Image: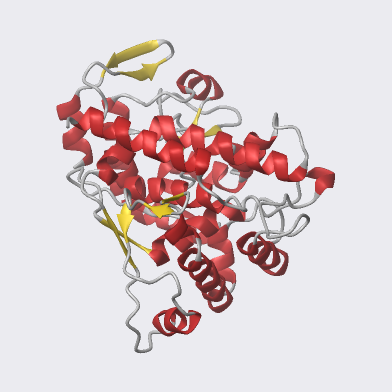
Amino acid sequence: MSSGQGAIALAERVLAVLEEGSFSATYKFALFVAILDLCIEKTERGGAPPTTLTTRDLALKVAELYWAHAVPYGAHGTLRQGGMRTGHQAEIVRAIEGARAAWADGQSDTLHRARLHDAVEFARLIDLVEWKLIEMPIPRLQVLGRHEDRFLYEYNWRHDIRHAAVRAYQHRRESDFDNRLLLLPGVAEQLVRLNGLLRPLFHREWAVMVAGMNRLPEADLERFLFGADRTSLDSVRGPLTELQGHSCFYCGKELGGRADVDHFIPWSRYPDDGLDNLVAAHPACNNNKRDFLASAEHVEHWVARSQDRRNDIDSIATDVAWQRDERRSRAVATAIYLRLPVATRLWRRRDDFVPSERSRLQRALT
């Protein structure tokens, strides 16, 4: 079977789970998106995707996904995302909502700041999320009807695993619990290649389920749950502008007025608010680039900024309590750029698109 046929077959099985899988909460969407994100962000420097994920990786990613959801949706309050009975809330969302109320200082606050605020309580929250994933969604994600078909990953615990065994592992006590998910051969590669198709599908179906649970129209829910503006970027606008010498990242001309903060790897491709993925740009340049991938010359400039100004970017991260993971941002770019079709054209400026120049991209990213 060719790689293209393998990707199509995998997509069909994922769709079957979404359509027929029995879930009373939105956990299946969170778990699918978390696996997809981790396959991208754990791509190696040479472009190879991971072969193994851990339950801790997944718990952190799922907490990040739900963190932005656990805020009031206007007068409706926090949106219900599951629970055994009507009116009840999914346990993970309820725990994150409680954590936000205790730690956060507004809707725009981030999971990263919560971790800085109270590392002990943060670890307890992730422990709970991890246990809930181990207990239910991870074993059930590959179940259709009464049959489990492990087409994505293998795992090494029984469905009746006890919380005590997981708690011992989490507290670094003696435990035989194995926290690894072993991705089946080719799965990570196919998921990364399908990212542009699967991500909007997951978001759409997730929003539809939330709309149904809360008896709300679907129109604005997807943007609220997954939009790029769900976290305010105001606190990094000034520091990024200074970092770039008050010049637009893309055209190099002076930023005379208020700069836009652009996601270099577009949010629609992968949601990365890390400092390395944020650049200050003229509003016109930002509007022209939109959700396009930037050309090889911009990629070279972007990689050089992260490397040459590493200490300055670290200082910004500390000063404004903003997340920075240079390795992750670089891995995301590598995963996306090195899998582009040969004929892809990339944005350079205004309405000018140029060939992708794969060898140049590979040199810059690897």
Left or right: residue 280 compared with residue 23: left
Picture quadrant of residue 211: top right
Can you give x and y, in whole percent of width and height, for residue 251 in the image?
Answer: 41, 22
* Quarter of the view holding residue 165: bottom left
In this rendering, would 292 be left or right of 103? left
Position of residue 293 relative to residue 113, above or below, is above
Q: Nearer the viewer, residue 102 or 63?
A: 63
Q: As drawn, which residue projects farthest toward the top?
A: 351
Horizontal side of 191 relative to 321 (left or right) equals: left
| Vertical order, 124 against 77 (above or below) | below
Observer-nearest of 124 and 236: 124
Percent across and percent down for residue 357 are 20, 22
Asked whether residue 245 is in view, the answer is no
Pick the front one: 75 or 238: 75
Q: Quadrant of the C terminus?
A: top left
The residue sitting at 76% across, 44% down in the picture is 214
Q: Is residue 147 visible?
A: yes
Q: Residue at x 46, y 46 (%)?
A: 33
Q: Residue drawn at (28%, 18%), measured in percent from left and top?
A: 344
Q: Quadrant of residue 8?
A: top left
